[in-house]
Image (cartoon, rainbow, N blue to C red):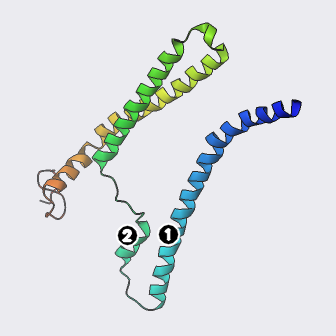
Amino acid sequence: MVMQSTIYALTDFLLPVFICCVLPVCIVLIVFVYRNKALTKKTDILKLAIEKGAHVDPGSLMEALAATGHRRKSVRLQLLNRLTAGCVLFMVGVIAIISVLCIPAEDIIPVAKAFFVSIASVICAIGVGFLVSFFIGKKMLKKDVEIEEMSLKYPDVDGPAPGTGMEEE
């Protein structure tokens, strides 16, 4: 009987540890190995092409090595992602704090209540960090966003778009 309760105690402890710690580390490791393997494969192909005497353009070489399978996000999209993440995390944190504080004191251990409030506060703080990052980034990258918008309006123009104040005189 003692052995069985020990096994349940270990299961109650180890299962959350594996789900919360080991599983995310394994996922990150798999993604890292996959990207590293893809980069190594591209590098090997380019080495073979150079060894066989094929002409390789340095610009396309750098683009091929830097390409990770997805396009670079625009400045505006990066800012909107920060705003979205900030709002979601802030609201989840606030709702979690309110819901934990509304639980009657008899129904939950005070240490657990303090733990959940602290976790919710951290989530809320991360959301506030994203919101601050959005507003500061919006201010600092205003010119970049304007240039990006102009380049979308005038895609055939080489160099800075007209009306950005960056044209050559």
Front position among marks 1 and 2: 1
Residue found 62% across the figure and 22% down from its top: 115
Which three-letter amino acid code belongs to the residue tagged 1?
Leu
Q: Is residue 121 above or below residue 137?
A: above
Placement of the C terminus among the 4 image quadrants: bottom left
Residue found 61% across the figure and 49% down from its top: 25
Q: Identify which residue, 70 or 139, lies in the foreground.
A: 70
Can you tell which quarter of the image residue 76 is in? top left
Residue 10 picture location, percent across and down: 77, 36
Total count of labels: 2
Tell me if mark 2 has few (under 14), some (14-19) or many (20+) residues whose alpha carbon lies within 10 angstroms of its own.
few
Residue found 22% across the figure and 52% down from its top: 148
Q: Identify which residue, 155 or 161, lies in the foreground.
A: 155
Disc 1 target residue: 39
Q: Is residue 53 above or below residue 47?
A: below
| Marks 1/2: CA–CA distance | 12 Å
Q: Is residue 30 above or below residue 114?
A: below
Residue 67 picture location, percent across and down: 40, 66
Residue found 63% across the figure and 14% down from its top: 108
Residue 14 picture location, percent across and down: 72, 38
